[in-house]
């Protein structure tokens, strides 16, 4: 490719990099049992939840940060992080009011917290730093028995449900970051869809980091009871800062008999600048449990942000006949690093899963797919199809695949395919010849490459994601 | 497995080395002796590989090491004269034959081509000091596998095979590794093969046991293909099912060289194969094949590593398993494309069939790619025999068992057809059929149909 | 030769055949026609013993033997042959080995010694000439990479090799152009003797121009709803299946 174009690196603009001038209620840096007690008391939590946190913390102390990922993670000083920071609101959010300054922030992000101006058919839970600031359409949803609220509110109003399912899919002992999150999580979203209810609108959580030096540790818990359905979206952004910030979230999803959950993520945390300064460390544990028969869980994700990503959304297929899909586009540019993929654990009979992963690496980034397909001894009739493709833009980046297949049952049929290739010069030339600039051509080709995944996203988000892919790759072409 | 710890075994082996260091070095060339200390220190520091680490994720090496073995520093004078024990011949296949008994070459009973050097490792070091010094322990020292360090520390016996520049060996060279004796025995065999510039040769390596004793064969073969060399290496592994073998085939390919490596694993209770190829010169081509047919309680682990360090090389890998009974199959295929190794073409495929409900298969392809103008792919499947094909065959009068047999043989055929010695390919097909039928071939299960005299 | 009494069969609990009655004498050619989904292919699968289908009742006698009690290979060895609608590709199994196994298994079943290599090759040569199959096809893997026409011709070649008493031609005409159809049909006709019978399953009348049936049955909704001479096929061709459907559905 024309080497002049490489040097013509445009300044890829991260358009969500602004900081809002909002006063924060912040506790001091550092982590110890007192800090955890303080977080718990600020949230007026019941004793059992404090115990849950402390137990997780004590376990965390026994763990070491995982090093198996294909990532170069700088030393993280866990005592140099603020574990709780809440934007101060001069109004009472319980009454559905919202601070004008906060509202401005979310407006700027394109997240309408004003129901009248809202995107039609999407209910939002907006989380800034450590707390949920506003949940829209709560009442309309409540009419159908759907609970959609901040995690803290759920702890107050639906303690039994929370207690029943919290940690049931991702136990605090699951891994290093899950233990940390379980100890210090501050807020997040909770969603319960009762039996037989199809949620009439998309539910969405929007995560925003604003305060400096803080870590974000939210939890999402979704429970879909028998024969119900929900489509859930998650979006995230953060300001541009030169230091790294830690985001260690947990998402737990429980899908009961014949229920279906569609979980979509558009992850656009601040990726750091061209030299690799700053950016979010996104260390997330996301897992669904297809608990009931014929339960279905579908993951779709577009990952363009974060300096370092470590996440493997997965599904435990426990119920007979349950199925799960994972569709992912992960883009890394500049100095970003991603080690991401999916896990499908087949336990029930006649379970099926599908993994489609598209990695795009540019700049000096490293992009790894890591996946596990496991068929346990009793999972008769299990089926998996995995496809992971990597596209390389430029010769300084890396694309890697680490699929693990473990088959303990001889009635399983498992297929895995992977390819790695560079963007087609002839395709770019063809576009050029038709008057399309190289940058636009790359955008077109990349979107075509990712189409299979983008098609699985809800409409409004698919459009957003498409734009995002283009922006993330700006200046990457060589 | 007996109740011994990995650390215990490590300490024992280290102590064994320390106690006999003088004897181990005695009469051995300097090039071998000077690397022993580093090797044993590494072994002592790291211990045996642990199950769960990336390299040994699904394999417990203690299955091989966790038994009491005898160890012999010197060639056992008591070892039976190989000539009286067996003689090897593939019907219709005319070969040169090199016989190795418990790690030591039996030159008396070997036939060696006149234009090729084949001798004891130490002898090779003395006769070709520069060649030996240039290549001995060069590839092995870079590996972080302590079974290889262990071999380096103890190495005394093995084969030095040198095919000089531009020599075209007219017949396949058959290397017969025989383990014999009535007591449990550990053998650390070390081989060095240098295929000179423009040379062409085919070697057939046959590992087998002549007794039902428990053996552990820890075999390391360093192989260098100099520019433009062609080497075919067919390995047939057929130890008794009480025995274990770790076979490390470490290969360096220089410019324009061509390699075929083909490993057929029939018997052996525990088998770990490391086939590691370094693409060190441009336009080199490697074709790496493997077929394992584990049954009973066999554990067969094939690990491959292709390191594309330079541009314009091609590697092709195909590994297949047909798993029966309680057997376990593992495939880990690591492909590394280093920065600037542009125009690399690396294809990898792993296909597996589980015949019985309790068979287990673990597969872990792994691609690390740091160059952009490459074509890389890998695929893995785990499945069963094709039901519709089975029905089709039964509708054509073929009984169910026979139909399954034909399908399994057909599955294996994809590997068999890559063999470039037609007679050998026919033998392979027979051997595979026998193995799949649960039959043992004659004499030590070796396909060579060695006859007792 | 073949007697089917009240044969009922289902797949995954869904009934497909709902009481089939049929009698075929030696030397007869029966055509079974019917719209898509009427159960034509299920009938051939059940007769040949495909385990995907469950027999729910009825009996089938073939050459005096209880057909349904036998495994598929014994049915085949006894002389029941099916030309598959979709012949299966078997990579790695050569046609030569495949057919040798088939022929010798059948001979063993009938108490005959296996053919020598020379005898077998002679037989292959003869039969491949008879059905006009390219001898190169027989040196390849079973059906692998064959075109649609080649696959069907290969089916007839196998039929010639195995000399069945009763052949079921399951939609042999589907996907064939007119030349291939003629060659396949002529092969079938050459193999016809007073001792052999055939069931020709087809959706269209076209094939029956070449393989002239003695009896035509119309299968609809899992039952034979009409039986007639070869003129019935022409009538169906003219009127289509809607005529049968409406007549039957009104009952």
Image (cartoon, grey):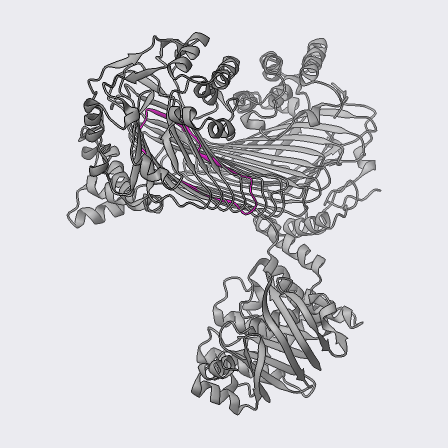
Magenta span of residues: A298-326
Q: Say which quadrant the C terminus of chain A sits in.
A: top left
Q: What's the residue at 26%, 17% (across, down)? A: A88
Residue B311: image quadrant is top left
Q: Residue furthest left?
A: A435
Asked whether residue A227 appears in the rendered view, the answer is yes
Give x and y (percent) for residue B341: 38, 33
Q: Is C158 placed above or below B145 here?
A: below
Give x and y (percent) for residue A206: 30, 30
Asked whether residue C116 appears in the rendered view, the answer is no
Give whichever of C59, B77 is nearer the camera: C59
Give x and y (percent) for residue A86: 30, 17
Residue B291: image quadrant is top right
Q: What's the residue at 71%, 25% (across, down)? A: B187
Q: Is B324 placed above or below B272 here?
A: below
Q: Is A297 placed above or below B179 here?
A: below
B416 sits to left or right of B229: right
Q: Is residue A324 magenta?
A: yes
């Amino acid at each position: 490719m024309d080497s002049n174009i490489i040097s013509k690196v445009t300044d890829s603009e991260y358009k969500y990099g602004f900081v809002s001038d909002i006063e924060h209620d912040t506790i001091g840096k550092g982590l110890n049992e007192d800090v955890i007690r303080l977080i718990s008391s600020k949230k007026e939590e019941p004793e059992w939840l404090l115990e849950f946190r402390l137990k997780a913390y004590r376990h965390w102390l026994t763990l070491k940060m995982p090093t198996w990922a294909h990532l170069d993670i700088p030393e993280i000083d866990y005592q140099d992080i603020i574990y709780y920071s809440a934007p101060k609101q001069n109004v009472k959010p319980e009454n559905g009011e919202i601070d004008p300054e906060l509202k401005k922030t979310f407006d700027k992000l394109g997240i309408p917290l004003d129901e009248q101006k809202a995107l039609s058919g999407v209910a939002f839970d907006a989380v800034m730093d450590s707390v949920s600031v506003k949940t829209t359409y709560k009442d309309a949803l409540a009419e159908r028995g759907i609970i959609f609220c901040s995690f803290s509110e759920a702890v107050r109003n639906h303690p039994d449900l929370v207690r029943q399912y919290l940690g049931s899919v991702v136990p605090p002992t699951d891994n290093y970051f899950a233990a940390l999150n379980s100890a210090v999580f501050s807020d997040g979203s909770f969603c319960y869809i009762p039996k037989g209810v199809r949620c009439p609108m998309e539910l969405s959580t929007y995560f925003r980091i604003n305060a400096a030096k803080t870590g974000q540790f939210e939890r999402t818990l979704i429970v879909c009871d028998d024969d119900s359905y929900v489509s859930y979206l998650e979006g995230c952004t953060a300001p541009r800062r030169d230091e790294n910030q830690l985001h260690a979230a947990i998402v737990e999803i429980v899908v009961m008999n014949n229920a279906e959950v569609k979980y979509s993520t558009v992850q656009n945390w601040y990726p750091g600048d061209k030299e690799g300064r700053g950016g979010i460390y996104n260390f997330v544990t996301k897992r669904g449990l297809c608990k009931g028969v014929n339960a279905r869980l579908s993951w779709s994700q577009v990952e363009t942000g974060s300096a370092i990503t470590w996440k493997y959304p997965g599904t435990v297929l426990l119920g007979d006949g349950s199925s799960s899909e994972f569709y992912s586009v992960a883009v890394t540019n500049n100095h970003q690093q991603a080690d991401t993929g999916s896990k499908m654990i087949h336990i029930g009979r006649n379970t099926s899963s599908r993994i489609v992963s598209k990695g795009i690496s540019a700049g000096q980034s490293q992009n790894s797919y890591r996946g596990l397909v496991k068929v346990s001894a009793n999972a008769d009739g299990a089926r998996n199809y995995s496809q992971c493709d990597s596209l390389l833009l430029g010769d300084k980046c890396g694309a890697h695949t680490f699929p693990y297949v473990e088959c303990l049952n001889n009635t399983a049929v498992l297929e895995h395919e992977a390819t790695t290739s560079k963007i087609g010069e002839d395709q770019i030339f063809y576009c050029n010849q038709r008057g399309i600039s190289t940058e636009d051509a790359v955008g077109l080709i990349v979107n075509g490459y990712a189409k299979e995944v983008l098609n699985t996203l809800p409409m409004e988000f698919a459009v957003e994601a498409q734009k995002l892919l283009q922006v993330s790759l700006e200046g990457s072409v060589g | 497995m007996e109740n011994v710890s990995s650390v215990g075994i490590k300490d024992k082996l280290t102590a064994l080395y320390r106690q006999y260091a003088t004897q181990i070095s005695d009469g051995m060339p300097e090039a071998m002796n000077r690397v022993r200390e580093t090797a044993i220190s590494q072994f002592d520091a790291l211990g045996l590989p642990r199950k769960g680490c990336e390299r040994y994720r699904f394999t417990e090496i203690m299955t091989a090491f966790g038994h009491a073995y005898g160890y012999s520093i010197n060639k056992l004078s008591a070892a039976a004269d190989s000539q009286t024990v067996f003689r090897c011949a593939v019907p219709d296949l005319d070969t040169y034959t090199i016989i190795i008994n418990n790690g030591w070459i039996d030159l008396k009973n070997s036939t060696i081509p006149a234009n090729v050097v084949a001798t004891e490792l130490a002898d090779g070091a003395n006769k070709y000091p520069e060649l030996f010094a240039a290549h001995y322990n060069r590839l092995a020292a870079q590996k972080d596998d302590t079974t290889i360090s262990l071999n380096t520390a103890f190495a005394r016996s093995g084969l030095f095979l040198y095919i000089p520049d531009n020599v075209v060996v007219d017949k396949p060279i058959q290397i017969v590794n025989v383990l014999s004796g009535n007591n449990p025995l550990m053998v650390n065999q070390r081989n060095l093969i240098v295929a000179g510039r423009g040379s062409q040769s085919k070697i057939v390596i046959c590992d087998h046991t002549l007794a039902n004793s428990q053996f552990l064969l820890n075999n390391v073969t360093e192989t260098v293909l100099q520019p433009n060399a062609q080497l075919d290496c067919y390995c047939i592994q057929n130890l008794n099912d009480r025995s274990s073998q770790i076979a490390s085939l470490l290969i360096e390919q220089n410019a324009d060289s061509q390699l075929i490596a083909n490993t057929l694993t029939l018997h052996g209770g525990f088998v770990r194969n490391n086939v590691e190829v370094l693409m060190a010169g441009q336009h080199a081509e490697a074709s790496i094949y493997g077929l394992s047919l584990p049954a009973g309680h066999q554990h067969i682990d094939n690990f491959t590593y292709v390191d594309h360090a330079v541009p314009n090389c091609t590697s092709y890998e195909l590994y297949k398993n047909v798993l029966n009974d309680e057997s376990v199959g593992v495939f880990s295929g690591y492909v590394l494309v280093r920065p600037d190794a542009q125009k690399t073409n690396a294809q990898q495929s792993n296909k597996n069939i589980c015949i019985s409900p309790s068979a287990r298969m673990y597969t872990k392809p792994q691609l690390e790619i740091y160059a952009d103008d490459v074509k890389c792919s890998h695929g893995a499947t785990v499945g069963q025999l094709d039901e519709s094909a089975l029905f089709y065959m039964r509708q054509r009068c073929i009984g169910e068992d026979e139909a399954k047999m034909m399908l399994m043989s057909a599955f294996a055929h994809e590997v068999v057809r890559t063999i470039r010695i037609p007679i050998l390919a026919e033998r392979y097909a027979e051997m595979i059929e026998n193995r799949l039928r649960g039959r043992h071939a004659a004499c030590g299960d070796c396909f060579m149909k060695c006859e007792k005299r | 030769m073949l007697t089917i009494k009240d044969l009922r069969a289902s797949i995954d609990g869904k009934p497909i055949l709902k009481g089939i009655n049929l009698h075929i004498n030696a030397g007869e050619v029966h055509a079974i026609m019917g719209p898509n989904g009427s159960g034509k292919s299920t009938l051939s699968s059940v007769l040949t013993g495909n385990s995907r289908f469950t027999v729910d009742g009825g009996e089938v006698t073939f050459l005096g033997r209880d057909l349904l009690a036998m495994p598929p290979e014994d049915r085949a060895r006894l002389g029941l042959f099916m030309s598959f609608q979709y012949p299966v590709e078997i990579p790695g199994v050569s046609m030569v080995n495949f057919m040798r196994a088939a022929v010798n298994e059948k001979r063993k079943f009938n108490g005959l010694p296996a053919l020598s290599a020379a005898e077998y090759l002679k037989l292959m040569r003869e039969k491949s000439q008879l059905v006009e199959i390219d001898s190169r096809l027989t040196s390849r893997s079973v059906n692998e990479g064959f075109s649609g026409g080649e696959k069907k011709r290969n089916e007839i070649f196998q039929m010639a090799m195995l000399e069945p008493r009763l052949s079921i031609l399951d939609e042999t005409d589907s996907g064939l152009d007119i030349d291939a159809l003629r060659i396949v049909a002529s092969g079938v006709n050459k193999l016809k003797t007073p001792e052999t019978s055939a069931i020709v399953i087809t959706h269209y009348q076209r094939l029956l121009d070449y393989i002239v049936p003695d009896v035509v049955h119309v299968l609809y909704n899992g039952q034979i709803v009409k039986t007639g001479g070869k003129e019935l096929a022409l009538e169906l061709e003219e009127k289509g299946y809607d005529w049968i459907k409406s007549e039957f559905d009104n009952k």
